[in-house]
């Protein structure tokens, strides 16, 4: 009897525990972003130039991390509204906006549920914050029926995201450095100058 009771308690605790994050992390193609995924989630190939990381749980939930140049938007709230407009929802229950902090930085979070052009209803949590001259948009989505259950996971992705802008700037300079010297040495006339005594 005690065993059954302890199993029931363990199941209850598990149901209300925060999501367990696996050892698996996904990185953006340029190596500047890294996101830890909860158990059961997997990486999906990003589509479009602004999408850096995409992952899904295979049951209707997904997260997309995008980066936009800061100059393209008035502020973070404008960038968040743009993200909602891109969803092209046929209807929505009105976006709930709140000011939050992500990694000590001010951020805007929008929470909206609506109907997509496919007819499927889904809930979205969109978090936008500024980082290194870019607006980072972390959008979590889940089917409407699972949205309440998944909202904690979807909201947590923004704080799980790690950004290392230094990797982006060191990459191109390192690759352009070795390439530059090899060009001039190959075409340089300094090695051809010694046969100058010929005009004698």
Image: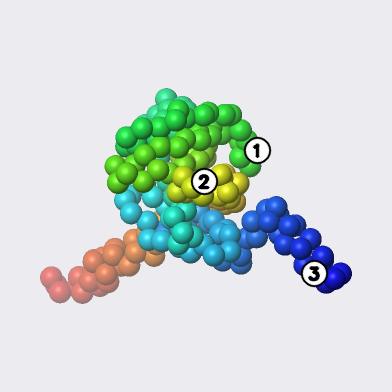
- Compared to 106, does 121 lie above or below? below
Q: What residue is shown at x 51% (from left), y 35% (from top)?
A: 111
Is residue 12 visible in this depiction of the protein?
yes
Residue 168 percent across, percent down from the top left: 46, 53
Q: Earlier in the sequence, mark 3 or mark 2?
A: 3
Report the quarter where the C terminus lies: bottom left
Instruction: Give the number of the disc on residue 147.
Output: 2
Mark 2 and mark 1: Cα distance apart in space: 27 Å
Pointer 1 residue:
104
Whole-angstrom CA distance, mark 1 to mark 3, is: 44 Å
Q: Nearer the viewer, mark 2 or mark 1?
A: 2
Q: How many marks?
A: 3
Front position among marks 3 and 2: 3
Asked if one can make out residue 141 in the rendered structure from this viewpoint, the answer is no
Element type where label 3 sits in the image: helix
Secondary element type, mark 1: loop
Mark 2 element type: helix
Relative vertical location of residue 58 with respect to residue 83 in this rendering, above or below = below
Q: Residue at x 34, y 36 (%)?
A: 89
The picture quadrant where one finds residue 23 is: bottom right
The crowding category of the residue bearing disc 2, from other C-alpha atoms within 10 Å (few below 14, some 14 to 19, many at least 20), is many
Residue sitting at x 42%, y 52%: 52
- Which of the marked residues, 1 or 3, is nearer the chain's N terminus? 3
Disc 3 and disc 2 in contact, CB within 8 angstroms: no
> Where residue 176 sits in the image (x, y, percent)?
37, 59
Q: Which mark is residue 4?
A: 3
Give residue 120's mark: none
Mark 2 or mark 1, which has the lower sequence index?
A: 1
């Amino acid at each position: 009897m005690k065993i059954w009771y302890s199993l029931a308690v363990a199941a209850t605790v598990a149901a209300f525990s925060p999501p367990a994050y696996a050892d698996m992390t996904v990185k953006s193609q340029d190596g500047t972003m890294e996101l830890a995924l909860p158990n059961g989630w997997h990486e999906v190939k990003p589509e479009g130039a602004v999408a850096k990381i995409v992952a899904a749980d295979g049951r209707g939930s997904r997260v997309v991390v995008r980066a936009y140049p800061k100059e393209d938007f008035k502020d973070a709230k404008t960038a968040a509204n743009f993200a909602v407009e891109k969803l092209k929802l046929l209807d929505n229950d009105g976006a709930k906006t709140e000011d939050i902090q992500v990694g000590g930085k001010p951020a805007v979070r929008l929470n909206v549920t609506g109907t997509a052009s496919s007819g499927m209803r889904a809930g979205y949590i969109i978090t936008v914050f500024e980082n290194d001259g870019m607006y980072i948009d972390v959008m979590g989505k889940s089917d409407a029926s699972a949205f309440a259950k998944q909202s904690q996971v979807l909201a947590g992705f923004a704080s799980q995201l790690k950004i290392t802008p230094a990797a982006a700037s060191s990459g191109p300079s390192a690759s352009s450095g070795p390439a530059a010297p090899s060009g001039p040495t190959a075409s340089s006339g300094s090695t051809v100058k010694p046969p100058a005594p010929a005009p004698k």
